[in-house]
Amino acid sequence: MDRDDIRNIMIELIEEVMPEIEEVAFNRNIVAEYGVNSVSIIKLIVAAEKRFDIEFSDYELALDGYRTFEDMVVLIYEKLEDKE
């Protein structure tokens, strides 16, 4: 799975978990631009774990680890690469 595939799936997950976000731009600051909070990011992480069959560490659950949605795409890509 490449990063574009991950982005497409993440758009679906973001729309499901954060329906208030009308247009997803992966390089925008998720706190400043979208008002994402720690509860929202955990919900998104849980959805991503289920969808991609991966696990995030406790450290990776913190909102401050993700400035943009692209940061999450990169981490998911790395986790999927490690599984192979």
Image (tube, rainbow, N blue to C red):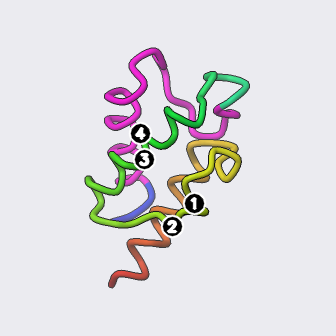
Q: Nearer the viewer, residue 58 or 69?
A: 58
Residue that badge 4 annotates: 43
SS under mark 2:
loop
Residue appearing at x 49%, y 72% in the figure: 78
Q: Which mark is residue 60?
A: 1
Per the image, the residue denoted by label 3 is 7
Q: Which residues are magenta?
A: 4-30
Position of 69 compared to 83: left or right? right
Q: Are marks 4 and 1 in contact (CB under 8 Å)?
A: no
Sequence order check, earlier mark of 4 and 2: 4
Residue 7 covered by magenta stretch: yes
SS for tag 1?
Answer: helix
Of pointers 3 and 4, the one earlier in the residue sequence: 3
Mark 2 surroundings: few (<14), some (14-19) or many (≥20) residues within 10 A: few
- Percent position of residue 52, x then y: 30, 60
Upstream in the sequence, badge 3 or badge 1?
3
Percent from the top left, x then y, of residue 81? 42, 78
Q: Distance between the Cα atoms at labels 4 and 1?
A: 13 Å
User: CB under 8 Å between callouts 4 and 2?
Assistant: no
